[in-house]
Amino acid sequence: MEVFETKICPQCGQELFSDMNVCYGCLHSFEERPFEAASVLAAFPELDEPDELDRPDDDAPPPPRSPTGSLMLRISTGDAQTTVPVPACGLTIGRDVLSDIVLKSRAVSKRHVRVVPLSTAIIVEDMGATNPAMYKGREVRETAVVHAGECFDICGTTVTVVM
């Protein structure tokens, strides 16, 4: 009998094979990527929660990714729907397999948007998408603040902020 090594997803607790880089239960990525908060802070200097956007020095190990409060994203396509917690360090959405949330559509850019949590809203930051995300009928070319209960669209995929 063959024995496989496993690991536990820190976000949803699902048991996974040790060679998996993404949890297919909650789409948690096991690959840490540095976070650049400078562009978000420059766009929103009035933020009173900068500590949520800060990352530790390069010498320090990255903190574990955990959901902030109860902010989540409900991702709905024509044939599927899932809900994903938004970690304190934010997450990326795109076609690239290294994105935290991978959308398999040729219309979606490899690095489409970054989502950064606030207390009751998220900041959606464009990452140079060819077909930008849409919020309230307008293209998100730089950033947009999307509050709980509101949604934005990425090439036909609806992303709703839920608490």
Image (cartoon, helix red, strand yellow):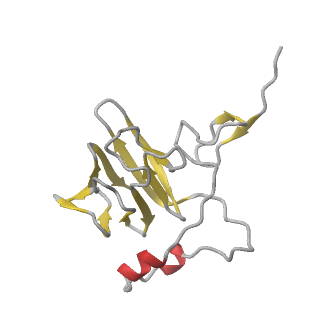
Residue at image position (27%, 53%) is: 131
Q: Residue 44 location in percent, x, y?
A: 36, 80
- The quadrant holding residue 127 is bottom left
Would residue 65 appear left or right of 81 to someone viewing this image?
A: right
In the image, 102 versus 127, the foreground residue is: 127
Would residue 138 appear left or right of 133 to someone viewing this image?
A: left
| Quadrant in the picture for the N terminus | top right
- The quadrant holding residue 125 is bottom left
Residue at image position (73%, 67%) is: 61
Q: Residue 30 location in percent, x, y?
A: 64, 49
In the image, 55 versus 104, the foreground residue is: 104
| Quadrant in the picture for the C terminus | bottom left
Would residue 84 appear left or right of 32 to someone viewing this image?
A: left
Q: Is residue 13 above or below residue 152?
A: above
Q: Is residue 146 above or below residue 131?
A: below
Residue at image position (68%, 77%) is: 57
The single residue placed furthest to the top in the displayed view is 1
Q: Residue 109 location in percent, x, y?
A: 38, 50
Residue at image position (40%, 82%) is: 42
Q: Residue 91 location in percent, x, y?
A: 49, 57
